[in-house]
């Protein structure tokens, strides 16, 4: 065990008591050794005194051995070994957690890329839908115009059918009158041809006028 000499002031600086010096004061009495912080013991140097390290009752596994040496009681070492094993297990768990986190980051990046692609597709689909709405509106306007023209064409057709019906009736009436007029004309021609007062020239002129 290391032994230290008392601390004294040498030329104003703290130092161990130089060899050969004594702690006797000028008056011839013995000096007192005061235990500093963390030490116990001390007293008048006239007595057999000593200084020891001041340990608490439960000094975290520190003990004084039988040969007055500071030693470990083994509990602290066992606790340290358990703490080391727990730390190593925690490191293994951290590695697994890190690998899981890295995999999660990869999936998140892929999911973000997929989401961005979906947003792009949605924008394209929206643009296509807007274009389809424009074309549909134009088709609707064209259809409405077609319906309007169809209504006008239907009215015109109906009017034409009415006129055609009237023309057909007029034609049919004319067909009825024509045979009667033809018979009447033929009878007149017969009477004129057989009339003794009509000359040949008069008959020819009359035929030309009636044709």
Image (cartoon, rainbow, N blue to C red):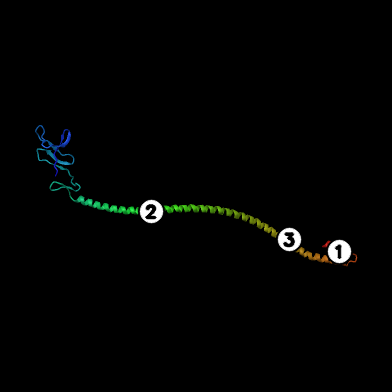
* Front residue of 133 and 21: 21
- Vertical placement of residue 67 versus 171, above or below: above
Left or right of 158 in this view: 134:
left
Q: Residues within 10 Å of mark 1 (few under 14, many from 20)?
A: few
Q: Nearer the viewer, mark 1 or mark 3?
A: 1
Badge 3 or badge 2: first in the primary sequence? 2
Give yes or no for contact between labels 3 and 2 (Cβ–Cβ under 8 Å).
Answer: no
Q: Which labelled disc corresponds to residue 106? A: 2
CA–CA distance in space, label 1 to label 2: 118 Å
CA–CA distance in space, label 1 to label 3: 35 Å
> Circle 3 — which element?
helix
Which residue is at a point 69% across and 59% down the rendered structure image?
160
Which residue is at a point 45% across and 53% down the rendered structure image?
117
Which residue is the site of mark 3? 167
Image quarter where the N terminus lies is: top left
* Front residue of 152 and 208: 208
């Amino acid at each position: 065990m290391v032994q230290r000499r008392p601390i004294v002031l040498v030329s104003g600086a703290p130092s161990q008591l130089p060899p050969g010096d004594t702690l006797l004061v000028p008056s011839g009495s013995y000096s007192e050794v005061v235990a500093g912080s963390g030490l116990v013991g001390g007293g008048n140097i006239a007595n057999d005194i000593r200084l020891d390290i001041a340990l608490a009752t439960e000094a975290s596994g520190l003990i004084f051995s039988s040969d007055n040496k500071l030693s470990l009681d083994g509990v602290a070492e066992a606790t340290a070994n358990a703490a080391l094993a727990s730390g190593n297990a925690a490191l293994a768990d951290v590695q697994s957690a890190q690998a899981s986190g890295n995999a999660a980051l990869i999936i998140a990046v892929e999911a973000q890329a997929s989401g961005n692609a979906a947003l792009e597709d949605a924008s394209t689909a929206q643009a296509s839908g807007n274009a389809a709405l424009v074309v549909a509106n134009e088709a609707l306007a064209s259809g409405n115009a077609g319906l309007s023209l169809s209504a006008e064409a239907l009215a015109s057709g109906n009017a034409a059918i009415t006129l055609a019906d009237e023309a057909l009736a007029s034609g049919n009436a004319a067909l009825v009158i024509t045979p009667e007029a033809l018979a009447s004309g033929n009878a007149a021609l017969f009477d004129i041809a057989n009339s003794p007062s009509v000359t040949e020239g008069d008959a020819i002129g009359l035929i030309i006028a009636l044709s």
